């Protein structure tokens, strides 16, 4: 039997690079893999000699559509908010006459309470459940982050095209790809500490962030990929195929205090530095061109229960946020120097 064809985007990114590496380890000989790459490099071909490369950007509609139409499985781990790329993938798979599977990356920004916030860092008890509240998730407002494109993929599911969405929260830990290996949450926070010489939390600092180690996110991709390779049984698809990839959660004030202590220990904060409360305006000023992003990251609540992933056998086993924090801070500090 000929190997199944896999088309994947985002393989020089933090998540996509780690996903590709693990696929090659576990299923490299059972799949014919094609990756979209804006700028093919010698380093890439040497690291992934068995991966076929299609040259193109997320704006190259015809290139993406053609590659998707030829694939038995598509993993979209690239720019999850790029409408053109999403439309091209869906255009391609719609041309198929034989069953195919699409696994699309999203993020828990869609369920953040940032639209409800008064930006005081308050606790919100709502923990979204990806089975019990799947209708509410599907019916999120258009202004919810990532959600419009998520709906496109949910609605594209039919007898031929089966779709699933993997929705991770804030991710920690170093990636393993050859491109970007760092996530945003801790590294960007450390950059802010280096500039302002103090750790901070918004208002009361009681907002809760869902978190997951990069290895556990990758393992959920592999688990759903394996379900697709086997024909799709044992997994949910379409409007039901929405999987939170959440392993734990942290109160941001606790994270800020822990990072302040590590900053003193590692020498990138003064000896008397401590975590302090900041106002909305102070936090928003960290990224003047996108104040909503930093307020979302360090001031909102964003929590989900991964009931659907656990139902199909996902068992997070990576290091905890707290176990990884020392290394994450060291790496972030070294890169920011």
Image: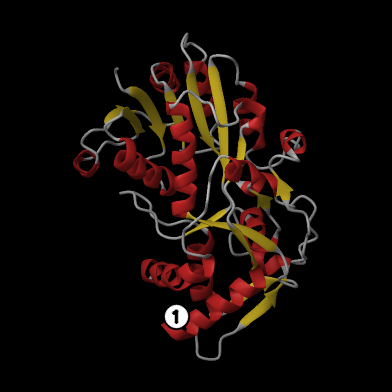
Is disc 1 placed on a helix, strand or loop? loop
Farthest residue, direction bottom: 272
Of 97 and 298, the residue lying toward us: 97
Q: Where is residue 304 in the image (x, y as percent from the top left)?
A: 67, 50
* Rendered-image quadrant of the N terminus: top left
In the rendered image, is residue 34 in sight? Answer: yes
Find residue 29 and report its horizontal and vertical position in percent: 26, 32
**What residue appears at the point 45 percent right and 85 percent down from the top-left corner?**
265
Q: Position of residue 226 (x, y in %)?
A: 44, 33
Q: Which residue is drawn at 52% across and 14% down?
A: 94
Image: 195 above or below 295: below
Name the colour scheme.
secondary structure
Does any portion of residue 294 appear in the rendered image? no
What's the residue at 70%, 76% (across, down)?
Answer: 277
| Viewer-side residue, 20 vs 198 | 20
Place of residue 63 in the rendered image (x, y in percent of width and height, measured from the top left): 39, 21
Label 1 belongs to which residue? Answer: 268
Q: Nearer the viewer, residue 334 or 72?
A: 72
Which picture quadrant has residue 81? top right
What residue is at 75 percent from the left and 40 percent from the top? 133
User: Front-most of 290 and 95?
Assistant: 95
Q: In which quarter of the image is residue 287?
A: bottom right
Left or right position of 144 against 183: right
Q: Which residue lies furthest to the top in this view?
A: 97
Quarter of the rendering occupied by the C terminus: bottom left
């Amino acid at each position: 039997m000929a190997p199944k064809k896999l088309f994947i985007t985002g393989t020089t990114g933090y998540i996509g690079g780690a996903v590709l590496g693990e696929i090659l380890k576990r299923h490299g000989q059972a799949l014919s893999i094609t990756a979209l790459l804006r700028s093919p490099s010698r380093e890439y071909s040497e690291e992934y000699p068995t991966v076929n490369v299609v040259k193109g950007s997320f704006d190259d509609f015809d290139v993406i559509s053609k590659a998707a139409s030829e694939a038995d499985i598509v993993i979209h781990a690239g720019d999850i908010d790029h409408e053109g790329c999403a439309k091209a993938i869906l255009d391609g798979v719609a041309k198929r006459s034989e069953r195919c599977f699409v696994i699309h990356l999203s993020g828990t920004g869609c369920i953040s309470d940032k639209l409800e916030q008064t930006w005081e860092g308050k606790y919100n008890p709502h923990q979204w459940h990806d089975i019990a509240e799947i209708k509410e998730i599907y019916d999120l407002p258009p202004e919810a982050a990532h959600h419009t494109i998520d709906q496109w993929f949910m609605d594209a599911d039919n007898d031929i095209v089966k779709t699933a969405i993997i929705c991770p929260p804030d991710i920690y830990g170093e990636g393993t790809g050859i491109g970007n290996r760092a996530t945003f949450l801790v590294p960007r926070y450390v950059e802010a500490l280096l500039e302002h010489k103090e750790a901070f939390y918004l208002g009361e600092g009681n907002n809760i962030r869902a978190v997951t180690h990069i290895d556990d996110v990758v393992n959920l991709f592999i688990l759903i990929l394996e379900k697709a390779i086997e024909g799709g049984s044992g997994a949910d698809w379409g409007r039901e195929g929405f999987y939170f990839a959440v392993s734990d959660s942290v109160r941001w004030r606790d994270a800020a205090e822990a990072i302040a202590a590590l900053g003193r220990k590692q020498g990138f904060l003064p000896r008397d530095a401590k975590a302090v409360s900041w106002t909305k305006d102070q936090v928003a000023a960290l990224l003047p061109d996108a104040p909503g992003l930093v307020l979302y990251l360090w001031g909102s609540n964003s929590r989900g229960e991964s009931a659907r992933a656990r139902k199909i056998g996902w068992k997070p086993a990576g290091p905890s946020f707290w176990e990884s924090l020392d290394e994450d801070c060291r790496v972030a500090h070294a890169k920011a120097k």
